[in-house]
Image (cartoon, coloured by chain):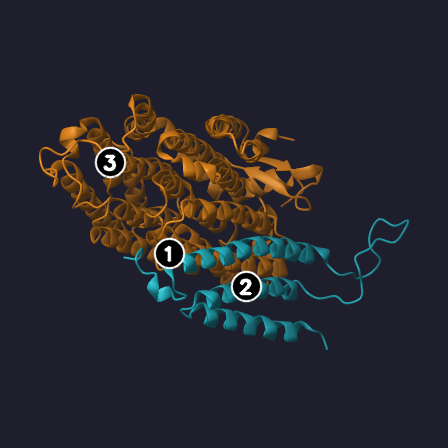
Chain colours: A orange, B cyan
């Protein structure tokens, strides 16, 4: 019985319920939100340390042995993702102390955020595919409510597309779970991995695998299933956009990695090929879509699509180095993209608009913000010595090692176009003269006071520091990712850790 | 004759109908399509996991395992969970289209292209 495996699920659920209990007390809810984020981060650190020391951990709910009971399982991949969830939850909870309006908080922002974190952590930790569906629904319901918080027209329109496509994806997932149960008579991931080679009807297994792939590719916003993301991510309050960009598509990508390294590995000529082509198109189409945009947050939303392509590329290449690159890319992208969304929020506070043509002169009035933006933007584009350079180098090298030259070429072209997009934002929002003229006030009417400003800048600065740290002091990150990559490909060890010694 | 082929046809018809409804422009038809789709997925679980009639999975007194072939209770537990979840989610979807109708003033997805690119 390892309690640290269950804690990352229990903690946000507990703090979510606590925040609900203090529905009328806004101040208490804010404290609960921050403490919840802190506790989840601490639990994530504990879990990661435990997994690093003892290998794959499992917790059998209610003492029922897997595969009969529900099992929570944590390997290095899961534990790292959980830690990421905690850090992002904390950062966004801090940032929203200032950026969220009273009305948003009154309609339950803080409990919903905790519920979202619980769903995400549950999805990362579960060792059972039906439970994965349940946790994904938990986080979806929370994200639905967060997306329409405020109830503006654009949010309604975005939410209809978001809700519909995500429900369709969930139902495809549910259908695939049903078919899997019909084929194998089990839903436990480890047991499925053990039985996968014994299936009589391999064609049907591949079809079910592709069904799972479609379901998770919608959630991950991969080509050609990403259209809900650019339609919805720029509509909610910016802290919500930021936590969505950090975590939601990552759940889809995590599930893809889990399914296609652990379970559906019998027909690589089908699944890996689809993933490889899909990743190439995702990278290119996403970055080209971003190049056509002139709204700060829409550019960032399209870049989320393109960066997902890199992560799937690592999965498709399927070597330890490539998988390690994927994991680090997830960390890098969460950190950097969340930071860019948070910065777009601060620039909105300063100017009252997200349109690039109406922005301008931020470098003159807000030099600190400009430096923080530059760090994040250049990291996203992959310039050394920042985090983006490290992860792109890993993926490119993995691609060259297996001689997949065309995907490497696409990845490098995408990097160049990403740089173009980021320079566009820099030139339009920060560098050019303020279109309102020289005498315009530096800040919008809702600019927070000194204390509030500190709370807006501290999370942004922390994330920028993390992005630099990942690039400059890469060694520990690299070690963790390489160990996780090796572990992902060692299916037998995972199966044995979950099912016990009597498994094959 | 077993009921499985019949169920398979029913599931197929439901999936097809749901897809057709979701491709229409009307918001109401969109939600009806989602409801049918969730029913189709639930029936699919029921059909693929095999049907056993008239044999409840009860363990007779004094024994540790059930006697003979019994129905598998797990798919039904899965379906029950899925029904509850989809009930909650679809209730949200119904409220959402009502609010969207109030805000936009039209039951037409083509009127909702502002956030697309």
The answer to whether residue A339 is visible is yes
> Which residue matches tag 3?
A347
Q: Give the structural element (helix, strand or loop) at label 3.
A: helix
> Which residue matches tag 2?
B35
Q: Nearer the viewer, residue B62 or A122?
A: A122
User: How far from the left and from the top, in percent, is residue A334?
Assistant: 36, 38
Q: Which mark is residue A157?
A: 1
Q: Give the structural element (helix, strand or loop) at label 2.
A: helix
Query: Are discs 2 and 3 located on one and the same chain?
Result: no
The answer to whether residue A273 is visible is no
Q: Which mark is residue B106?
A: none
Q: Are marks 3 and 1 in contact (CB under 8 Å)?
A: no
Cα distance between the residues tagged 2 and 3? 42 Å
**Is B77 displayed left or right of A50 in the figure?**
right
Instruction: Report the chain holding disc 1.
Output: A
**What residue lies at 54% left-to-right and 61% top-to-bottom?**
A205
Query: Are discs 3 and 1 located on one and the same chain?
Result: yes
Quarter where residue A2 is shown: top right
The quarter of the image holding the N terminus of chain A is top right
User: How far from the left and from the top, in percent, is residue B48?
Assistant: 63, 65
Q: Give the structural element (helix, strand or loop) at label 1.
A: helix
Cα distance between the residues tagged 3 and 1? 25 Å
User: How far from the left and from the top, in percent, is residue A436?
Assistant: 12, 40
């Amino acid at each position: 019985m390892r309690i640290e495996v269950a804690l990352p699920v229990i903690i946000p659920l507990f703090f979510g319920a606590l925040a609900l209990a203090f529905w009328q007390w806004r101040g208490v809810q804010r404290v609960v939100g921050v403490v919840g984020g802190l506790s989840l981060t601490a639990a994530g650190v504990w879990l990661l340390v435990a997994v690093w020391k003892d290998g794959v951990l499992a917790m059998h709910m209610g003492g029922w042995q897997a595969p009969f009971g529900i099992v929570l399982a944590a390997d290095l991949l899961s534990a790292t993702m959980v830690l990421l969830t905690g850090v992002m939850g904390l950062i966004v909870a801090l940032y929203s102390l200032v950026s969220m309006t009273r009305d948003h908080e009154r309609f339950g922002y803080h409990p919903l955020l905790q519920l979202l974190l619980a769903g995400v952590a549950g999805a990362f930790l579960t060792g059972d595919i039906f439970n994965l569906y349940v946790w994904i629904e938990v986080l979806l319901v929370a994200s639905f409510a967060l997306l329409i918080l405020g109830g503006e027209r654009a949010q309604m329109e975005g939410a209809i597309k978001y809700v519909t496509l995500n429900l369709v994806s969930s139902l495809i997932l549910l259908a695939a779970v049903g078919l899997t149960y019909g084929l194998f008579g089990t839903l436990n991931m480890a047991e499925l991995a053990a039985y996968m080679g014994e299936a009589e009807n391999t064609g049907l297994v591949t079809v079910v695998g592709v069904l799972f792939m479609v379901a998770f590719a919608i959630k991950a916003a991969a080509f050609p299933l990403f259209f809900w993301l650019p339609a919805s991510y720029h509509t909610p309050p910016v802290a919500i956009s930021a936590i969505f960009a950090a975590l939601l598509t990552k759940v889809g990508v995590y599930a893809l990695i889990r399914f296609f390294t652990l379970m559906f590995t019998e027909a690589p000529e089908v699944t890996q090929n689809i993933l490889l082509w899909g990743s190439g198109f995702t990278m290119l189409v996403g970055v080209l879509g971003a190049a056509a945009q002139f709204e700060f947050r829409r550019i960032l939303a399209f870049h989320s699509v393109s960066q997902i392509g890199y992560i799937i590329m690592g999965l498709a290449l399927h070597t330890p180095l490539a998988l390690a690159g994927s994991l680090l890319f997830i960390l890098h992208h969460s950190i950097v993209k969340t930071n860019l969304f948070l910065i777009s929020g601060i620039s909105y506070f300063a100017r009252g608009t997200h349109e690039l043509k109406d922005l301008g002169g931020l470098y003159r009035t807000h030099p600190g913000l400009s430096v923080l933006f530059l760090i994040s933007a250049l990291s996203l584009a992959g310039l050394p010595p920042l985090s983006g350079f490290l992860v792109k180098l890993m993926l490119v090298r993995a691609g060259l090692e297996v001689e997949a030259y065309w995907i490497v070429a696409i990845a490098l072209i995408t990097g160049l176009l990403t740089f173009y997009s980021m320079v566009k934002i820099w030139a339009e929002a920060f560098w050019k003269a303020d279109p309102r003229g020289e005498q315009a006030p530096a800040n919008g009417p809702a600019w927070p006071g000194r204390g509030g400003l500190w709370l807006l800048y501290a999370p942004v600065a922390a994330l920028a520091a993390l992005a630099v740290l990942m690039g400059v002091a890469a060694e520990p990150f690299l070690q963790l990712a390489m160990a996780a990559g090796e572990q992902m490909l060692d299916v037998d060890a995972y199966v044995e850790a979950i099912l016990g010694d009597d498994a094959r | 004759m077993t009921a499985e082929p019949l169920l398979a046809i029913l599931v197929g018809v439901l999936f097809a109908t749901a897809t057709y409804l979701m491709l229409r422009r009307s918001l109401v038809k969109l939600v009806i399509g989602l409801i049918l789709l969730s029913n189709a997925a639930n029936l699919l679980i029921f059909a693929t996991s095999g049907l056993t009639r008239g044999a409840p999975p009860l363990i007779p007194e004094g024994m540790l395992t059930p006697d003979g072939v019994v129905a598998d209770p797990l798919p039904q537990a899965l379906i029950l969970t899925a029904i509850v979840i989809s009930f909650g989610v679809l209730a949200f979807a119904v409220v959402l289209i009502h609010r969207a109708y109030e805000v936009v003033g039209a039951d037409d997805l083509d009127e909702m292209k502002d956030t697309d690119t």
